[in-house]
Amino acid sequence: MAVIPARVIHETIDDEVLILNLDTGVYYTATKVAAEIWNLLQDLSLDAIVVDLVRRYRSTRAATEAAVQDFVAALSAESLILLPAPGDGGVSAAVAMNELPFSWPRLDRHSDLQRFLLLYGLT
């Protein structure tokens, strides 16, 4: 499980997560699989997130694990989450695949906060 610092606020609107770092004024968007990962990060270990995604999406465990780790690293690099100590929430067991197409999770960075406020009616 990851911890979201108090300086980071977020809101899910439809299938998109809006994430705002109050210290920097930079906001981020995450859609589709990235939004799902973000919403699971506070409640599940990285292993449990991978297992959940592999059960629901058409993707291999290795590809899903790499995608989750890459996305989580991007969140951490932007100081949007605090990660557990190494060894807590690693990735392990295999599961069967499902039918939904899997898309690589992406964190989009935006520095135009005024546009964000106008777009989402926050002014």
Image (tube, rainbow, N blue to C red):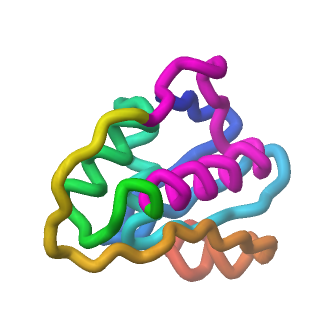
Q: Residue at x 54, y 56 (%)?
A: 66
**Is residue 122 shown left or right of residue 49?**
right
x and y, in percent, of residue 14 in the image? 30, 70
x and y, in percent, of residue 77 in the image? 78, 48
Q: Residue at x 66, y 30 (%)?
A: 82
Is 73 in the magenta? yes
Quarter of the image with the C terminus is bottom right
95 up-or-down from 97: above or below: above
Nearer to the camera, 55 or 33? 55
The answer to whether residue 42 is visible is no
Residue 46 falls in image quadrant: top left
x and y, in percent, of residue 105 in the image? 50, 67
The answer to whether residue 103 is visible is yes
Residue, far right: 24
Question: Magenta residues?
Answer: 64-91
18 up-or-down from 39: above or below: below
95 up-or-down from 4: above or below: below
Residue 61 falls in image quadrant: bottom left
Q: Residue at x 25, y 72 (%)?
A: 58
